[in-house]
Amino acid sequence: MNPTIQDVARLANVSIATVSRVLNDQPGYSEKTKQKVLKIIEELGYQPNAVARGLVNQKTGTIGVLFPSVSGLLSAEILHGIETKAHEHRYSVIVCNTAENREKTIKYLQVLREKRVDGLIFVSEAVTEEYYEIFCRMDIPVVLVSTQSYQYPLPFVKVDDRNGAYAATKHLIDKGHAAIGMIAGSEDDPIAGWPRIEGYRHAMREAGLSLEETLVQSRESFHYHEGRRGFQVLMKDHPELTAIFAASDELALGAISAAYEASITIPEDVSIIGYDNLILAEMSVPPLTTIAQPFKRMGSKAVRMMLDLINGKEAESTILPHELVIRDSVKSR
């Protein structure tokens, strides 16, 4: 038979109400009592029923997280930050992989509503009117990570992608490069596509360098194979290029692979800088110079913001700093 809250109270020699307060992190007991109750809970292997607890305090101790993809390293690092901070506060995390698909996203939002999650973290995807209407019907706090909405009043945590892209391009310029191309996401992508392209253009314009449209290779995604194709097209159209800013590390690694096949040496012939600082950037040959996003901190900060909202406090949107990580894929001219 599974242990009950009554068993915990009896062995700890406290009331059931005290055990409930400890479980729900409410005041009204000493630190000594808290430790005694937690010790008994651990020894018995007692698992409080989330639904039952929710009937009492209107909370289930769960947070829903929606990712456009759970297979990427970027998502893994954000999730690590979310789970670590959530578990510190005894919250569980329900992760949903939407595959950037409208129907799947709506279905998962319905599931999370049925599960009565206390809050929702929405990662790396644009908030549509349809999604926002569902958020409002769920009537729970929503925090955005690595994205933001200009249309809807939702708190977010992210880096400034325009400034990050500017810093990447400026690094190439400072190293003496003038013929600089870019492998980018879609200009129609308001999250990471257009802002990073604008950051590149700002740096080039500021330095008085060429801004031909064909210097920017806009791709459908930020994935490896798009980097390969983008590099091939760029070098065919602009063989004079000495440097490329790739708007993600995966794009950069695809470009390095295509360069190897074309007998183009990185960085002796062409310098490449990426964006994200995934672990793959360290494993690249040569190791990739890149702009680091603090993904784990983003996830952790999102949970802290979420808990403030759950507890009736305000949560201000946060822009975290990016960092230029210098390795071996960029050479001075």
Image (cartoon, grey):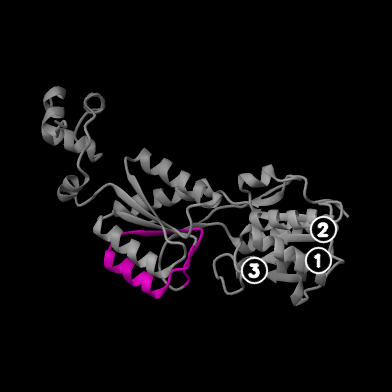
Observer-nearest residue: 21 or 42? 42
Q: Left of 14 or right of it: where is 299?
A: right
Quarter of the image for residue 32 reads top left
Q: Residues within 10 Å of mark 2 (few under 14, many from 20)?
A: few
Under tag 2, what secondary structure? Answer: loop
Amino acid identity at mark 3: Arg
Residue 174 seen anywhere in this rendered image of the structure: yes
Q: Residue at x 11, y 31 (%)?
A: 6
Mark closest to the chain's N terminus, 3 or 1: 3
Location of the C terminus (image quadrant)? bottom right
**Where does the image place residue 54, in percent across and percent down from the top left?**
19, 49
Asked whether disc 3 touches disc 1, contact meaning CB atoms under 8 Å apart, the reply is no
Quarter of the image for residue 16 reads top left
Mark closest to the chain's N terminus, 3 or 2: 3
Asked whether disc 2 touches disc 1, contact meaning CB atoms under 8 Å apart, the reply is yes
Q: Which residue is mark 1?
A: 235
* Alpha-carbon span between mark 3 and mark 1: 15 Å
Amino acid identity at mark 1: Met
Under tag 3, what secondary structure? Answer: loop
Observer-nearest residue: 108 or 204? 108
Q: Which residue is mark 2?
A: 262
- Comparing marks 2 and 1, which lies closer to the viewer? 2
Q: Which residue is mark 3?
A: 219
Asked if the magenta segment contains residue 181, the reply would be no
